[in-house]
Amino acid sequence: MKYPLVFKPLYIFPAFHFKHKFNHSATATGGSLTFINLKTRKLNLHNTKAIIALAKQILYMKKIMIAAVILVSLPALAQVKEGKIIYERTMQLQIQIADDNPAMRNMIPKERKDKYELSFSNNKSLWQRMEDEQGDEMNFGGDGAQIRFVMPGSDDISFNNMDEMKKIDQRELGGKIFIVTDSIRRLNWKVAGETKTVLGHNCMKATAQRTQESMRMNMDNGNMTRQKVVDTLNIVAWFTNEIAGSLGPDIYQGQLPGTILEIDINNGRNTYRAVEISEKTDAAKIKEPTKGKKVTADEFAKEREKLFSDMQQNGGGMRMNIRSN
């Protein structure tokens, strides 16, 4: 005949969680269990194996939970804190000649490609065209006709401070250089569930819209006219949280909780795509530009308006769009 023994009831937890009153080696691997006494109750010793199995299961589940936390934390620990991203910009050219000559039209390039460099460190960035890229002039044409096209803003430099949501641009306008201070304005982004990989970095898709004012200059029978046009731009961006900061190409900085590696504006009219990422940069060179006349954004807009008026008086040879923001 077996007699049940009388014990105080036992609740089992891993030993590192509670202050123990005494330890009992309960597992084959030597793991200790803590027995916490609460009140007197009968316990059948034949259930000890089940209690030990339950303890093993608890320890196993905690190991899984710890591993899961480590895996989730790895991307943050592996974030690129500073470095350099090379972007390739592809811009579809929309050039219209007043004299719609098919031969001349066929000589006009359909797109232009440039490479830009984004250096970043300590939540600050510097955006500029790479030094070995072509200049801001494009010349094309055949015998008897040559066209010179100047790309505005090709040599602009943009410094962005994401902590202060402030940007300072060095901009060229009409042969003069200005230092323009303005705030970073976030767009109303919608993050979709789509993902893809860009240069080995996991990216998420986000979409937004923004309006952009352009001044359309048109020459007709020797008379130049200008018209302000407001365009709605549909933007698709792919960003990653594996690169620290709210970075991106051109004016698309301080926008998303991560770094934009690809962006498409109006179905390919203008695109930026990261082609190279380096974790090395000279952080001392990431600073505000100082060369030029310091103006506010409103003062720069007045200077631009004056330039438009001068262009209208002097005339020109083709229709073009000049961005106003």
Image: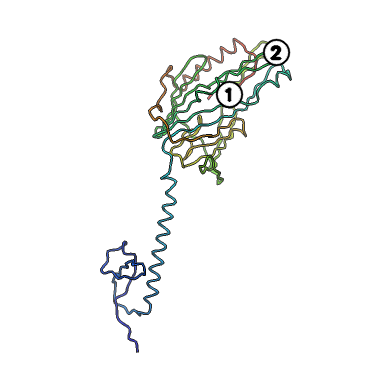
Q: Position of residue 43 (x, y in %)?
A: 34, 79
Residue 37 placed where, x, y %?
A: 28, 71
Q: Residue at x 73, y 19 (%)?
A: 103
Which sits earlier in the primary sequence, circle 2 or circle 1? 2
Label 1: how many Cα within 10 Å (few below 14, some 14–19, many 20+): some
Of badges 2 and 1, nearer the viewer stands 2
Q: For the residue marked with disc 1, what is the amino acid?
A: Ser
The vertical placement of 227 against 125, above or below, is above
| Structural crowding at the residue carrying mark 2, measured as other residues with C-alpha within 10 Å and reported as few (<14), some (14–19) or many (≥20) | few
Quarter of the image where one finds residue 216: top right
Relative to 232, is 150 above or below? above
In front of the other: 299 or 146: 146
- According to the image, label 1 marks what residue? 214
Q: Identify the residue shown where x is 56% and y is 45%.
A: 194
Residue at horizontal 37%, vertical 71%?
Answer: 52
> Is residue 17 left or right of 195 when viewed as pictured?
left
Q: Secondary structure at mark 2?
A: loop
When asked about the image quadrant of residue 65, the answer is: bottom left
Question: Residue 143 shows which numbered tag?
Answer: 2
Image location (x, y in percent) of residue 304: 52, 18
Amino acid at dot 2: Asp
The quarter of the displayed image where residue 280 is located = top left
- The residue at the far right in this view is 102
Kindly report the distance in space between the C-alpha atoms of the residues bearing marks 2 and 1. 33 Å
Quarter of the image with the N terminus in it: bottom left
Q: How far from the left and from the top, in percent, is residue 310?
A: 56, 12
Q: How many marks?
A: 2
Residue furthest toward the left?
Answer: 21
